[in-house]
Amino acid sequence: MLPPKPADNFKRVSRSDKEWRELLTEDQYRVGVKDGTERAFSPGNHNDEKRDGLYHCVGCDTPLWSSEHKFDSGTGWPSFYQPVRETAVDTKTDFKLIMPRKECHCATCGLHMGHVFKDGPPPTGERWCINGVVLNFKPA
C-alpha cells in the first residue's frame, strides 16, 4: 500500500502566499501555512476514519500517512506512529511554547502538518499528531 518512492529528480513545490490563499480554505491556510492547529475532535478531521487508505497533503497531493500506521491516541487528532516513508515529511524544532516540540511539515510543499511526540505505540514509540484539515483521505 506504500506509494512509490520519489524519483531521483524529486522537486519541491513552491507557492506564493497568493497561490496558497487561492488553493486552500481559510482553515487549511491558517493551519498549513501559518503553522496553526485545528481544534481537537473537529468534524471531518479524519480522527474517526477507519477505512484502509492513504492520507495525502492538501497542498501538493503527496501521500504522507497510511491507515496501516494510524492509531487512536484519544487526543482528537489523527495520530500515526510513522509516516509512509521517512522522506515524506521534514521536521524541525518548534520553540513557540515553553517546551520545545518537534514540528512536522510535508517534505514536498512545506505545509505544516502537526507535531511528533515520544508517547506513541510500538514499534516506533512516536505519536505523529496531525491536523486533519491539511489531509485528503484516499480510500484503498
Image (spheres, grey):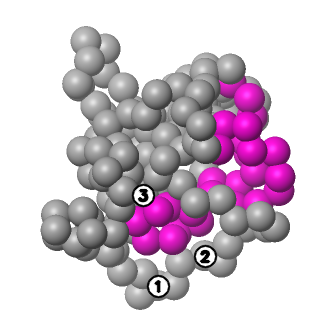
Secondary structure, mark 1, is loop
Q: Residue furthest top?
A: 98
Disc marking residue 5: 2
The amino acid marked with disc number 3 is Cys
Q: Are marks 1 and 3 in contact (CB under 8 Å)?
A: no
Where are the magenta residues, as a range?
A: 46-73
* Kind of element beneath mark 2: loop
Of pointers 1 and 3, the one earlier in the residue sequence = 1
- Image x and y of residue 22, in percent: 27, 69
Q: Amino acid at mark 2?
A: Lys
Instruction: Locate residue 47: give its quadrant.
Output: top right
Asked if residue 52 is positioned above or below residue 92 in the image, the reply reads below
Residue position for label 3: 106
Answer with left or right where residue 16 lies relative to residue 22: left
Residue visible at 36% across and 46% down?
Answer: 27
Question: Toward the viewer: 44 or 116?
Answer: 44
| 56 over 3 or under it: above or below | above
Query: Which residue is under mark 1?
Result: 8
In which quarter of the view is residue 4 placed?
bottom right
Left or right for 3, reference 11: right
Q: Quadrant of the C terminus?
A: bottom right
